[in-house]
Amino acid sequence: MPVRIRLQRHGKKGKPFYWVVAADSRSKRDGKFLEKLGIYNPNTNPATVEIDVDSAVKWLQNGAQPTDTARTLLSRKGALLKHHLVKGVAKGALTEEQVEERFAAWLSEKDASNTAEISALNKEKEAAKAKALEAEKEANEKRAAEIAAANAPEPEVVEEAAEEVAEEVSEAPVAEEAATEEAVTEEAPAEESSEDEKPAE
């Protein structure tokens, strides 16, 4: 029975995640499998990969062939390296202690590089966030300036309004004087007519 180490799709539409499984090559992609070896989630940044290295090495020793993507994932987690080192033990070139030492050293280097990659990604995120906040602040300031400019009266209108007020103030006393003179002239003929109407003695 030819065994393949491959991905089995799970998750919802547009956001898949995968199980890394050892399965019969004749079975369906999402059908029966012999053993679940790990998970792969490409939706995170960086992608989440969890592999049971010892189980993967066991299947590789038994002749299981990984697909291209599964081979990349196994290589990332060190399963292919350990499989290569175990072959050296079988040939007598290495001891199991040396295999464990070399694999532990490789894991420590890989963890350091992963930590550096994650810190670089976090720095990029923070820089992008700061840049977006700065751009938003500039846009808000520009919008506020435009609103203030739109609401402020134009200088010519202010000058015209001041001139009109000044003219009204200067015309008001003249109008009051004219009104008082008209009132006086109207009262004077009325008094004369009342005197004319008196009977002669």
Image (tube, rainbow, N blue to C red):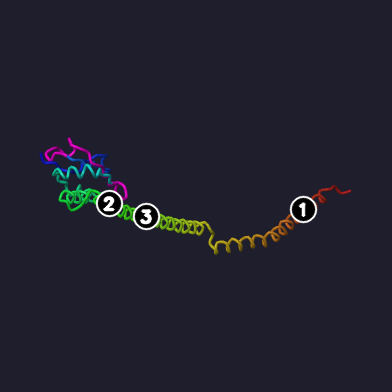
Q: Which residue: 18% across, 49% down?
A: 89
Residue 101, labelled with which disc?
2
Crowding around mark 2 (Cα neighbors within 10 Å: few <14, some 14 to 19, many 20+) is few
Q: How many marks?
A: 3
**In the rendering, at what x and y percent does residue 63 appear?**
13, 44
Q: First in sequence: mark 2 or mark 3?
A: 2
Magenta stretch bounds: 23-48
Q: Quadrant of residue 174?
A: bottom right
Please name the residue that numbered disc 3 is placed on. 119
* Amino acid type at mark 2: Glu
**Secondary structure category for the residue under label 1:** helix
Q: First in sequence: mark 2 or mark 1?
A: 2
Q: First in sequence: mark 1 or mark 3?
A: 3
Residue 47 within the magenta-colored segment of the rendering:
yes
Q: Which residue: 26% across, 53% down?
A: 102
Foreground residue, 65 or 130?
65
**In the rendering, at what x and y percent does residue 43 appear?**
29, 46
Foreground residue, 137 or 154?
137
Foreground residue, 105 or 45?
105
Q: Quadrant of residue 34?
A: top left
* Amino acid type at mark 1: Glu
